[in-house]
Image: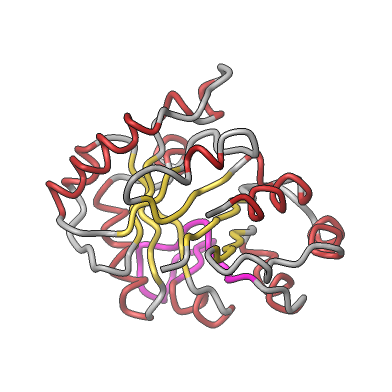
Amino acid sequence: MKKLLIANFKQNKNKLEIKDYFASNSFNTNEVCQVVIAPSFAHIDLVKELGVDVQVAGQTVSPFPKGAYTGAVGALQLKDLGATYCIVGHSERRKYFAESSQVVNNQIKELEAVGIIPIICFSDLDEVRQIETLKNDYYLSYEPIDSINTTGLNPNAYENKDIEATFSKVKDIVGDCCLVYGGSVDEENITRLCDVKGINGFLVGTASLDSNRFLELYRKVT
């Protein structure tokens, strides 16, 4: 299985910046890594049109089926745009948009219904215990709160042994699953993090916004 390298652009970049991002970078040289780009909803079409060697993900999705939900983007619409994956339960969505674990479970059900693979974020084991549906091809992304840039501090990626300990506890709860780490992943620590036992990929925020930095990450994934 290839490791996923997921770029979460969050609320960043305009059309010109996205075109420039891919203008001179190719992501088809690392046979063990699959790049997944999560742009804003407004730019999913553009990333697909550019024809670059990446998969596309949504940053979130409506927990409701199609209908009268102003401002929401549903799973069917994401599928129509060509999204293969979708991030749900990100700590920023939980914090700023009050998305509860029940909302996350509804999002997972909506994605499952259209064949989009969820990337389910969690910061603690209680959030893992509250996941109602988890299939073998779904991804669980561990993002410890004190290791991501929303804290206002200068966070560092967790040590391998600490990540492995959490991964082991997750598997005790849900059984075998695909596991991703997200928390201050950058070009300085990616080689070390690739050695985490059982890791299936990385969710990258800040370091994904610069195309040269992200390309260096891509080249270092083993």
**Which residues, given as a range, are shown in magenta?**
54-74
Secondary structure character of the magenta stretch overall: loop
Looking at the image, is 135 positioned above or below residue 9?
Answer: below
Structure colour scheme: secondary structure
Task: Say which residue appears at 61% left-offset and 63% top-offset.
Answer: 41
Looking at the image, is 42 positioned above or below residue 211?
Answer: below
Looking at the image, is 185 positioned above or below residue 139?
Answer: above
Rendered location of residue 3, percent (x, y):
47, 60
- Residue 136 is left or right of residue 207, and the answer is left
Quadrant placement of the N terminus: bottom left
Q: Is 156 part of what is drawn in magenta?
A: no
Task: Say which residue appears at 16% left-offset and 46% top-offset.
Answer: 129
Q: How many marks?
A: 0
- Residue 117 is left or right of residue 48, and the answer is left
The answer to which quarter of the image holds residue 17 is bottom right
Q: Identify which residue, 84 or 172, lies in the foreground.
A: 172
Task: Say which residue appears at 39% left-offset and 33% top-offset.
Answer: 160
- Residue 151 is left or right of residue 103, and the answer is right
Rendered location of residue 199, percent (x, y):
38, 50
The answer to which quarter of the image holds residue 105 is bottom left
- Residue 23 is left or right of residue 28, and the answer is right
Q: Is 73 part of what is drawn in magenta?
A: yes
Task: Say which residue appears at 37% left-offset and 79% top-offset.
Answer: 115
Rendered location of residue 137, percent (x, y):
32, 69
